[in-house]
Amino acid sequence: MSDLLTPRPPLEERADPYEHIFIIHPVRDCPFLQLGRRQKVTEGGQEHLGIPHWFVLDACLVIAGKGFLSSTPFRSGRVTTDVNGYLTGEEYRFFLDDSNDYTICTDFEEWMPPLRKDVPERWLAIDRHKKGTPNPIEEDLFSDISVCVIADDRICVVSGLNEELRATHLVPQVYASWYHMHQIYQQYTYPGTIKAPKARPIDDIRQIITLESGLLESMDHPSFVIAPFSDEYVAFFFASRRVGMVKHYHLRTVRLPQRIEGYALFTRFAWAMITIAQALPPTALPKKRKGRHESDGLSDTESLHSPPGQRCRTHATGDGGIESVPLLRQFV
């Protein structure tokens, strides 16, 4: 009996080997995005930690616009790694295709969602075999809708377990007005709302998934997104900090119900990247940098550029989910 009252030893610390990757603004010379590299990659006989090239490009697409990465401060240092390859360096500059300077989006409500045709095709792979719209749930309140969704799904889409289940929106329900204003449902495979007459548009079951409560908290932090990976969708942990769940769930295949929309997954990814994006330091004019004028057709001191159709603001909106991890290096 006394053995039952003996405290159990503490659990060993969960390993989460990762390294930082900083994406730097080429004119302001400061990082605006920090991610974690976790995939083991062998280069030249040595093992490194990397992150998919496309993941970083898609993050920059959301935050700044369409462009490319450079391993040097110049456009001529454009990364030649295949888009499906891995980035193993610590620092990269991001250039727009047609500009050196640009604003970044740090407020999701200011983000202008793209048309479906402008979303990278990899995010929409889940929609290829859809043959019609799912039947709507005839409930008006999300509390009732969530009960129906959980009963239908039965398990967490990531862990496969059936305990402590929660139904959650891919586009967080705090953005219900934003979702309705931009009519996100018009970008789905079959445009239009699927809901009861009095239900909110954001309660469309095509963007509601079932997660364990712990995984839900981690995704909301945000620590991971559901992302396309090798013809499947996986839980992709991108946080530039230690996350205990990585050992069990990083790159685990996700069992998504057929109703889930690829566009909703991309929008959730956009929310996560914008949430962790770092505001650029305020300045009246881009900083002029000596010795960095190359004959590539663009000057280092161009006027501020904002991609067409994207409304952004660059003032800080809080910590954006970033904890005290080494953003200590000074980029000057």
Image (cartoon, rainbow, N blue to C red):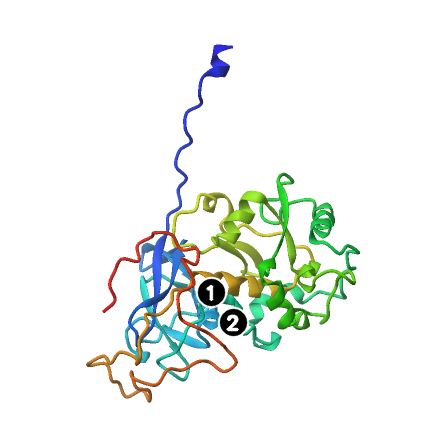
The kind of residue tagged 2 is Trp
Look at mark 2 in the image and give the residue it sits on.
Answer: 111
| Horizontal arrangement in the rendering, residue 44 relative to residue 186 (left or right) | left
Q: Position of residue 59 (x, y in %)?
A: 46, 67
Q: Position of residue 266 (x, y in %)?
A: 56, 65
- Which is more toward the observer, 84 or 14? 14
What kind of element bears circle 2? loop
Task: Examine the image and state in which quarter residue 91 appears.
Answer: bottom left
The kind of residue tagged 1 is Ile
Task: Examine the image and state in which quarter residue 193 appears.
Answer: bottom right
| Horizontal arrangement in the rendering, residue 8 relative to residue 73 (left or right) | right
Quarter of the image that includes the C terminus = bottom left
Q: Which mark is residue 129?
A: none
Q: Position of residue 315 (x, y in %)?
A: 39, 69
Look at mark 1 in the image and give the residue it sits on.
Answer: 274
What kind of element bears circle 1? helix
Give the CA distance from mark 1 to mark 2. 9 Å
**Image marks 1 and 2: residues in contact by CB distance under 8 Å:** yes
